[in-house]
Image (cartoon, coloured by chain):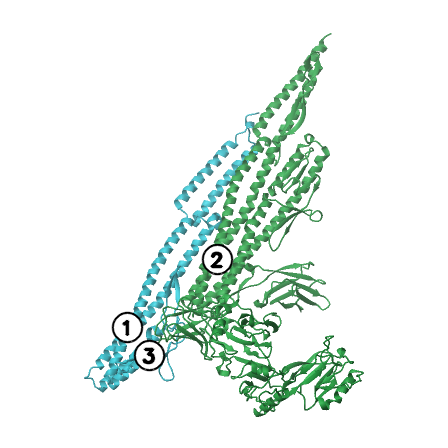
């Protein structure tokens, strides 16, 4: 009976709580993230009564949460996927709007530029059209910079958005960690407060919007959350610990790295592909970065290609075109000390000097000066407020802190640095750099067209002589040359056009010398010996570096003065020039320059016999300073062997004869030097057959030996002295300066060592001839004359060199001829020659000598540059100039070629520039510039469309997930209303039970 | 299965706002008259639109070039035609002069007239176009092509460069003739008829010789001069026909460009422009849809169990 009361009471309590819960649900109808709570009423433990069980009523077991973990998981997943699309769509739309608009996009600017170019082509002389063209070029550069700038803004924006989202993640992580701590205190999921769990799920959902998360639930309900690819990597929440997420953005590549625990564990998180974070990353990766790179690439292509065409044209002032655009480095400011008070501005003043090097600006408080240092080259500049370095001017305003350091990081961003630099409309290079004028009287009436088409392969065939180290202006090097390998002819190399003051020295056996032959690439023989037909045919061929069709000509072989090739001064012989010697003071510092007079010393005169004719050197075989010398017929007649003194005497006589006495002095000299440390004072010595050391004696010192030698000077005509380093020098006595010195005795064949006191090889040391200039201006030139050859100079003890003074106007081919090896040394001043520029300064004349043969003549010097056969397929090619004729030429046809300096109405080059619009060679894949850009915009557009479609589909999925969750956890007013009625009735019924129990009890109490 | 109250409201509201967004898009389209107001409206077509607009632009430029070309060619044509008139007149005078009955003073009059016309021919040869460029100087368009040198002879100082301009995507037009082409030297045969010697004589020199011959009454030389006038005429006529052909090409090309422009513009319009009828119909549909959603929401949202429980 009493149980009835308990039953009733239990029921009342239970339903009271149920009503409470229902009201709670109604009150929380609109609460975000609220899960519907349900009172779980279970029956009480039944009581056993005999053979049956009596129920004991009900009891509230728990206030449960309507919650489905799986649906929740789906919901989070769908949120992440959906949210990914939003930033992708939004930002991509902005990019499409920026890049794809006709008014503000690149295509419009390109169209205007090319239109302006075509307008100039219709009237190339018009100043207004040229000015319009320049302003459209400026417009193009500006448009590129604007677009680059807008993309840069997007970069900054998305970087900031990334940072904001990461901050959001960090905040949520911390909150979740707190919730986890709370949850862990209780320990069992079923005992946790629903509100806490709701909070936890709410946080998880919020996290999902930012990135896709993987959740691992502990038995207590606490969760570990990771944003990486697996549950264990990239954990941002681990129980009570929230780990800090950071982003590192590479300024050059725009790449983003996500780092956990930057300051300790430094774990890189990869695989974040969903949520708004993933969306922004995807945008940067798939849209922003490719757009930036494509724009930069186009800007660079435009600068390179447009400049390339422009430089090949001629402007209205007759000069070759210059660069139309340039790309300045882009500087970003980075301060190490935060001094907000500084204002730093920079401007490019010399586009040609700019470098993509970062600069460091440092303030020195002692000198109150700023120093700018180029971080790559070390070059520096100082100034108080204004600094000039690397072609830019920097101005710094404001008060710097102590030791303020600022870095200007340079980066190469073509789209942001491109600039038009030509200001003067006259400098627009609209015309072609060459012009061909047909003579009106030409029999064939053929029209000629001319184009500049240098062929790069022309230059690579031959090695360039002497060009080893470009930092030295004077180049000298030596190489071994052996023509005997190939039928006594060997092509050694080429002298590149532009070199100055070239000296080719060939040192070889004087009795069998190697000769140098110098040619132009069109087969004109400029210097060297006579060649027979076979030799000519062997040399002049394309395999040897000659142009196709070149023919041999010796018209200019060894020519002088006006008859020479293009008035080039080529000397074949031996030469000495006055030399500049640095004057040093006592400290070794250069204080001035003295000029030493020229001095030419021959080799030791070889042993040579005068032939039967009695003449050793023919008349006019050798020339001295431009005058041919008479024959040298030694007094000894045929069979004699003239020595240095005799030769010197002959030369001296010639010098007098030519009236050069006051300029040149000829003498004979001879010297034999003995190394002081090698002296063998115990050995005998004979000089010129005379024993110097008396028998039985030996010199006690080098000085004593010298004295002994000088004792017999009377007989030997040789005297000696001790040099500065203690060496013994033997020379001819005065009056016998060039006399031969014979040293003996010879080698000890037993020991192999020299057998004389001086320890020099025994034998005859022939004298040399010395020619000295008497003033500082005269040079000494011994050259091979018309009746001579290198052998003639060899008889004088001289090797034959080739000297080319001035600048070499075109490539020259050097051939060595001989039957033995020799050493070639090349010295030159390295200089450059721009073929286009130098050719334009000449006037050429093209004449057909027969119907099929033509000549090319340099009009100014009347030099025949080429004689070739005409081939209609190849046309006429000369050093990069290509001329084609409209019909077959005839004998007598003449054409004039010049640099088109006054052809201001010519529009060929501006047409070529306009033609770049449809050129498919500028961008990979065979697209034009505009097509390539449009293609890129299409790609972004497609990406955008796809994202939109994905978004629509994902929205549906998300909606369904929301509905599913809602079905489980949502509050429906109607349902709650019904529950209210239910529980109210149950409550009333339970109350009735109590009343019934009471009534029953009363009844029991009534029993007396 | 149930739907929470929250969800019910949320869903209804989101659907209504979707309708409103559609309506505002349509409104913008109607206002602009274009389907694509900004490139991001149909991003996958943005590239195509740019390309077509670019092509339209290029056709406009071709038209401008054609106008410039036609102006130039017409200037040349005018000069050439005037020159032929002059030559015709000179020939008439020369034929009259070779009439035996004319005496010295009559011939003097004729010679003077011929000299005057030769001067006129010189000034025609040095003619300029509307941009002040000399017409027959080759590429040296700022320098008078036919000048008197120290000896009093007329020499040609221009060059032979021919230039072309682009008047279509794959079409260009030759724009000029050099002074040599039009007023160049003539062939003169001298010496023994059995072994003739051909030489070249400048056009103006030929005219000078003619007037001198008329003054002197030398009939051989007058006949020779008349022959040379025929040469001149022949050459001028040849050039006129060349210019005529070029003008014809230019006008045909104009038509081609116009047609291309028309085609491109219609393609562009198909992509970009709004079909008003379709747009208005769509708008009506959306409006009806919005109205229905709003009304139904108003009705349904009022239903709640609490009204019936008290």
Q: Which chain is green?
A: A
> Label 3's element?
loop
The vertical placement of A964 against A950, above or below, is: above
* Residue B90 placement: quadrant: bottom left
Q: Residue furthest front?
A: A750
Give the number of marks: 3
- Marks 1, 2: nearer the viewer: 1
* Cα gap from disc 3 to disc 1, whole angstroms: 15 Å
| Label disc, if present, on residue A783 of the rendered structure | none
Category of crowding for the residue at label 1, using alpha-carbon neighbours closer than 10 angstroms: few (below 14), some (14–19), many (at least 20):
few
The vertical placement of A161 against B158, above or below, is: above
Residue linked to disc 1? B234
Residue linked to disc 3? B202
* Residue A188 placement: quadrant: top right
Is A484 left, or right, of A110 in this rendering?
Answer: right
The chain to which mark 3 is attached is B
Q: Is residue A524 visible?
A: yes
Q: Which chain is cyan?
A: B
Is there one chain holding both mark 1 and mark 2?
no
Residue linked to disc 2? A929
The chain to which mark 1 is attached is B
The vertical placement of A105 against A84, above or below, is: below
Is A107 left, or right, of A224 in this rendering?
Answer: left
């Amino acid at each position: 009976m009493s149980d009835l009361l308990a039953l009733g009471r239990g029921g009342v309590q239970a339903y009271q709580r149920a009503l409470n819960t229902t009201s709670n649900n109604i009150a929380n109808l609109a609460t975000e993230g609220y899960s519907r709570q349900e009172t779980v009423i279970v029956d009480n433990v039944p009581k056993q009564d005999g053979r049956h069980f009596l129920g004991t009523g009900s009891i509230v077991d728990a206030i449960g949460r309507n919650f489905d973990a799986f649906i929740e998981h789906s919901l989070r997943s769908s949120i992440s996927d959906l949210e990914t699309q939003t930033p992708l769509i939004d930002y991509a739309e902005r990019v499409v709007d920026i890049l794809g608009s006709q008014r503000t996009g690149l295509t419009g600017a390109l169209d205007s530029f090319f239109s302006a170019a075509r307008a100039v082509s219709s009237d190339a002389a018009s100043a207004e059209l040229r000015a319009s063209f320049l302003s459209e070029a400026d417009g193009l550069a500006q448009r590129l910079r604007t677009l680059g700038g807008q993309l840069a803004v997007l970069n900054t924006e998305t970087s900031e958005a990334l940072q904001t989202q990461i901050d959001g993640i960090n905040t949520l992580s911390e909150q979740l960690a707190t919730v986890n701590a709370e949850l862990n205190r209780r320990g069992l999921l079923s005992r946790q407060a629903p509100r806490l769990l709701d909070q936890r799920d709410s946080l998880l959902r919020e996290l999902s919007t930012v990135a896709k998360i993987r959740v691992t639930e502990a038995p207590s309900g606490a969760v570990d959350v990771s944003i990486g690819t697996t549950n264990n990597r990239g954990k941002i929440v681990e129980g009570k610990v929230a780990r800090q997420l950071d982003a590192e953005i590479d300024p050059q590549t725009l790449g983003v790295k996500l780092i956990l625990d930057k300051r300790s564990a430094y774990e890189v998180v990869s695989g974040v592909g969903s949520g708004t974070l993933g969306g922004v990353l995807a945008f940067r990766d798939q849209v922003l970065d490719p757009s930036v790179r494509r724009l930069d690439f186009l800007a660079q292509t435009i600068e390179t290609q447009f400049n390339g065409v422009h430089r090949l044209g001629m402007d209205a002032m007759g000069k070759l075109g210059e660069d139309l655009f340039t790309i300045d480095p882009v500087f970003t400011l980075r301060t190490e000390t935060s001094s907000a008070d500084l204002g730093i501005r920079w401007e490019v003043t010399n586009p040609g000097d700019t470098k993509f090097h970062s600069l460091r600006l440092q303030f020195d408080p002692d000198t109150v000066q700023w120093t700018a240092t180029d971080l790559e080259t070390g070059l520096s500049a100082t100034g108080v407020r204004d600094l000039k370095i690397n072609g830019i001017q920097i101005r710094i305003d404001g008060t710097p802190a102590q030791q303020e350091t600022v870095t200007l990081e340079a980066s190469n961003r073509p789209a942001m640095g491109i600039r038009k630099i030509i200001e003067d409309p006259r400098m627009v290079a609209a015309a072609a750099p060459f012009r061909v004028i047909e003579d009106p009287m030409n029999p064939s009436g053929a029209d000629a067209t001319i184009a500049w088409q240098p062929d790069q392969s022309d230059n690579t065939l031959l090695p360039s002589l002497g060009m080893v180290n470009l930092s030295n202006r004077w180049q000298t090097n030596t190489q071994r040359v052996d023509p005997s390998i190939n039928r006594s002819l060997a092509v050694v190399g080429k002298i590149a056009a532009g070199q100055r003051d070239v000296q080719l020295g060939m040192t070889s056996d004087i009795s069998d010398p190697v000769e140098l032959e110098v040619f132009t690439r069109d087969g004109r023989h400029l210097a060297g010996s006579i060649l027979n037909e076979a030799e000519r045919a062997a040399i002049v061929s394309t395999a040897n570096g000659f142009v196709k069709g070149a023919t041999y000509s010796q018209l200019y072989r060894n020519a002088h003065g006006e008859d020479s090739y293009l008035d080039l001064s080529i000397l074949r012989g031996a030469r000495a020039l006055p030399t500049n010697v640095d004057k040093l003071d006592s400290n070794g510092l250069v204080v001035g320059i003295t000029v030493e007079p020229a001095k030419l010393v021959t080799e030791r005169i070889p042993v040579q016999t005068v032939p039967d004719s009695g003449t050793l050197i023919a008349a006019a075989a050798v020339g001295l300073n431009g005058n041919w010398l008479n024959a040298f017929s030694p007094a000894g007649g045929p069979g004699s062997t003239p020595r240095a003194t005799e030769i010197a005497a002959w030369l001296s006589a010639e010098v007098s004869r030519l009236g050069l006495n006051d300029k040149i002095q000829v003498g004979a000299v001879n010297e034999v030097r003995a190394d002081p440390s090698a002296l063998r004072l115990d050995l005998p010595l004979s000089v010129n057959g005379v024993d110097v050391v008396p028998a039985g004696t030996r010199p006690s010192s080098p000085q004593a030996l010298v004295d002994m030698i000088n004792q017999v000077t009377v007989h030997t005509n040789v005297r000696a002295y001790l040099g500065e380093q203690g060496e013994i020098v033997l020379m001819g006595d005065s009056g016998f300066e060039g006399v031969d010195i014979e040293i003996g005795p010879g080698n000890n064949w037993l020991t192999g060592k020299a057998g004389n006191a001086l320890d020099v090889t025994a034998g005859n040391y022939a004298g040399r001839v010395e020619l000295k200039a008497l003033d500082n201006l005269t040079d000494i030139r011994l050259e091979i004359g018309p009746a001579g050859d290198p052998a003639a100079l060899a008889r004088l003890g001289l090797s034959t060199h080739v000297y080319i003074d001035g600048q070499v106007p075109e490539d020259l081919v050097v051939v060595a001829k001989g039957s033995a090896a020799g050493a070639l040394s090349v010295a030159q001043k390295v200089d450059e020659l721009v073929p286009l520029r130098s050719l334009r300064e000449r006037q050429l004349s093209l004449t057909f000598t027969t119907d099929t043969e033509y000549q090319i003549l340099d009009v100014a010097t009347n030099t025949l540059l080429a004689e070739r056969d005409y081939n209609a397929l190849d046309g006429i090619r000369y050093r990069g100039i290509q001329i084609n004729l409209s019909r077959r030429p005839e004998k007598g046809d003449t054409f004039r070629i010049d640099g088109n300096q006054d052809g201001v109405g010519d529009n060929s080059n501006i047409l070529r520039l306009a033609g770049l619009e449809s050129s498919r060679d500028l961008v990979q894949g065979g697209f034009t510039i505009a097509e390539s850009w449009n293609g890129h915009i299409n790609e972004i557009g497609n990406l955008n469309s796809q994202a939109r479609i994905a978004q629509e589909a994902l929205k549906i999925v998300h909606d369904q997930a929301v509905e599913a969750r809602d079905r489980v956890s949502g509050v429906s007013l109607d349902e709650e209303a019904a529950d209210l009625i239910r529980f109210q009735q149950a409550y009333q019924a339970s109350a009735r039970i109590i009343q019934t129990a009471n009534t029953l009890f009363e009844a029991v109490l009534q029993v007396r | 299965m149930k739907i929470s109250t929250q969800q019910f409201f949320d869903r209804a509201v989101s659907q209504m706002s979707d309708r409103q967004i559609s309506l505002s898009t349509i409104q913008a389209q109607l206002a602009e008259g274009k389907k694509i107001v900004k490139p991001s409206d149909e991003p996958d077509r943005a590239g195509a639109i740019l390309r077509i607009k670019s092509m339209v632009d290029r056709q406009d430029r071709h038209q401008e070039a054609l106008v410039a070309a036609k102006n130039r060619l017409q200037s040349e044509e005018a000069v050439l035609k005037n020159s032929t008139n002059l030559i015709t007149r000179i020939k008439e005078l020369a034929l009259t002069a070779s009439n035996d009955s004319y005496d010295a003073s009559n011939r003097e009059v004729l010679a003077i007239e011929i000299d005057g016309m030769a001067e006129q021919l010189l000034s025609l040869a040095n003619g300029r176009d509307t941009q002040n460029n000399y017409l027959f100087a080759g590429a040296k368009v700022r320098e008078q092509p036919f000048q008197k040198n120290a000896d009093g002879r007329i020499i040609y100082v221009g060059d032979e460069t021919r230039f072309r301009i682009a008047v279509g995507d794959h079409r260009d037009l030759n724009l000029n003739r050099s002074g040599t082409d039009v007023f160049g030297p003539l062939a003169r045969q001298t010496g023994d008829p059995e072994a003739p010697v051909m030489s070249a004589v400048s056009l103006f020199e030929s005219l000078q010789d003619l007037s001198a011959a008329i003054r002197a009454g030398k009939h051989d030389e007058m006949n020779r001069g008349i022959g040379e006038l025929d040469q001149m005429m022949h050459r001028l006529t040849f050039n006129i026909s060349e210019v005529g052909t070029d003008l014809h090409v230019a006008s045909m090309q104009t038509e081609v460009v116009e047609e291309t422009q028309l085609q491109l513009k219609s393609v562009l319009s198909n992509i970009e422009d709004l079909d008003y009828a379709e747009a208005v119909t769509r708008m009506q549909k959306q409006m009806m849809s919005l109205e229905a959603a709003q009304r139904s929401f108003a009705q349904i949202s009022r239903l709640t169990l609490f009204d019936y429980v008290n």
